[in-house]
Amino acid sequence: MSSETQTILTTDGIPLEESLKKAEKKNKIKAFLLVCPLLLFLIITYVFPIGDMLFRSVDDRMVTNMLPKTYKAMEQWDGKELPPEEVFEGFYLDYKKLVEEKTFGKLATQLNYEKNGFKSILKKLKRKMKKFEEGNYKEQIMSVHKRWADVEYWRALKRRAPAYSYSKYLKGVDMYENEDGKIVQVPEDRRIHKILWVRTVEVAFFVTVFCFLMAYPIAHLLATLPMKYSNLLMICVLLPFWTSLLVRTASWMILLQQQGIVNDFFVWIGLVTDDNRPEMMYNKVGTYVAMTQILLPFMVLPLYSVMKTISPSLMRAGKSLGGTPFIAFWKIYFPLTIPGIGAGCLLVFILAIGYYITPALVGGASGTLISNHIAFHMKSTLDWSFASAMGLMLLTGVLAIYWIYNKLVGVDNIKLG
Amino acid sequence: MPNNEQFVRFDKVDKSYDGKVLVVKDLNLDIAEGEFITMLGPSGSGKTTCLMMLAGFETPTNGEIYLDKNPISNIPPHKRGIGMVFQNYALFPHMTVYENLAFPLRVRKVSKEDTDKKIDKALSMVSLTGFENRMPGQLSGGQQQRVAVARALVFDPAVVLMDEPLGALDKNLRESMQYEIKHIHESIGVTVVYVTHDQGEALTMSNRIAVFNDGKVQQLSSPDKLYEEPVNSFVAEFIGENNRFPGQVTDVSKDKCKVKLDDGSEILANPIAVKSSGEKTIVSLRPERALINTKEKMENNFKGKIEEVIYHGDHTRVRLNLLGNKDFILKVPNSSANMDIKLGNQINVSWNSFDARALDSK
């Protein structure tokens, strides 16, 4: 008992643990210095910008900072009827300052996200404001446009008061906080994001299934063929991998378009008539075909690396013990490939769920995915906070899938090769 | 009822993989029911191919294999009912020991109680009772080996094939497993076809041994006969140690022949594969058949110079330069008082002509 509690000393009388730490210290410093450049690079180019981007999704200080007096006055307002004179006065003063600084455009954009129609009445207010007299701003502002007398717009303004908000996340799942502070769904005809989410998961799921169905036999062949043939086949699998993504997607466009090679072939063998060529591009079919082809190597490689380690004598043992080839495959070979299946499916699914270029080029309207929508908000509407909110939602989804996978299969069982 | 002498029968079996080289040439081999037969040979001699043809993983290019008088070439492996122990055990790594053993029973739709009974019996046979719930990866090499043997026997196959099953074990374990497999064979009387390249293993375990070389069975006989009476120089060389004297036959009488060696001296030998004078031959003599300084009267007496003495515990190996053969090996028991075995000494070596077998010259 005592020997367990007693600290062990080295021959010099220094506690063993301390001595070990000292001896290991040099190695630790060396190891740290070796990874230091990469670590810095990652922090500067990856952790920091992504963190900043994600912060934008909840950061709503811009409007808050633009209208300090308005929000100060609004604290007293219960939001039921039109706000009192103080709110109008505060708003007038804040807006006047913004007009002088020429930053009112940003406010208009932000408020228009909150409620459509804000932009035009703000512009109109800007023009009319020059002739405003001092005092009774409520009347004067309300006379500019009838919407200014609509309490809904003031409520919308009040909703932007907190410095941090999760409204972008609600918007991402087609919900919003209504006038009573309840979270409700947007009208049915405006629920575009839900469709996109479902479609993204659906496409990712089916692409994973197609990849699995196609990759399993290929990987099996690769693992069992003699070296000289398997090398050739491996090059066939990897060759598209080495070709630019853009080139591959473009070649699918050539193949799949209505006057394209595949359709020509269908007409030639008499499957379809010339004036009735099926559309295989700018819809889900195109997305499925091109993404399956592009992601196939990500499924083949983990499967192959696992299958390579399965001794052929196991199948033989199964057969010699009386199992039909199917039973030997199903009870012996297949369970042993599960780590590869898990790794391949996880890899393909995660890549597919965030896929961008291919659906953008061959997907058309019905084949675009959530990532295309994120890009749309990044580039066209410049609503970065919404884009980053959706990005974070996507990331959370992927992490959730990873977590479920870990619970079901165990990450230790993944084999990436 | 006498045992079926042709329980397994290879009838004129040829096998070629590439259409150019025959791996197995005109193989005719009968295996009796309940026999332990070993296919012994260097690697590439065709012995494993024979086993794979019997198991059904390779098809004969020509000829037919019969199991209990039924041709089996067109029967797939899983319908042959032949148990097999593989070189690397081939235990299913994702199944427990119990599940491994239950696999052949489940595919045969054996009831749960019978399955349990049979597995208990098989595990106690290889003294692994209580290991049912272990995974193969948690077992030592020897234990895995036993599980593999138990699995091959659990469904009561008529024939069990073993493909170098002890190759991956260390020496001591290998020896104890040899006895264990031998005892299992004796207690249940199953027909065993065993493949190995280890002659010690073959000699210890088998009823009969088929020595393979170059796709052919060189000799098929019991272990003692194989060792004492090799029919050709390959077998003599491959089984045990062997002193070789190449020479030319000068005279053949009924059971003796004179062989003139390359250095000019003549020895008396037993004509096994030579018929007339003038033939080239290799005379083969087992080291323990030659005695030193003996008082017995023997037909061949020569003097040799001791080149090397190696102590082996129970015996001493002595290398002599005798009749132009610099690698003449003698085994001298350490109990005997042969004290003048010293490097450089000249000693008298004698042997009977019966033990010096004049074989083919290959």
Image (cartoon, coloured by chain):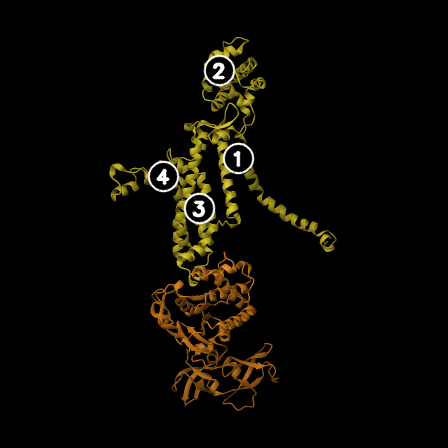
Chain colours: A yellow, B orange
Q: Which mark is residue A286?
A: 4
* Number of residues whose C-alpha sits closer than 10 Å to that of mark 4, classed few (under 14), some (14–19) or many (20 or more): many
Which chain contains the residue that carries disc 4? Answer: A
In front: mark 1 or mark 2?
Answer: 2
- Give the distance between the C-alpha atoms of the residues marked 4 and 2, in whole angstroms: 48 Å
Instruction: Specify the amino acid type for callout 3.
Output: Phe
Same chain letter for marks 4 and 3: yes
Which chain contains the residue that carries disc 2? Answer: A
Mark 3 in CB contact with mark 1 (< 8 angstroms): no
In front: mark 3 or mark 2?
Answer: 2
Instruction: Specify the amino acid type for callout 1.
Output: Ile
Which chain contains the residue that carries disc 3? Answer: A
Mark 3 or 1, nearer chain start? 1
- Give the distance between the C-alpha atoms of the residues marked 3 and 1, in whole angstroms: 26 Å
* Number of residues whose C-alpha sits closer than 10 Å to that of mark 3, classed few (under 14), some (14–19) or many (20 or more): many
Residue under circle 3?
A298
Residue under circle 1?
A50
Mark 4 in CB contact with mark 2 (< 8 angstroms): no
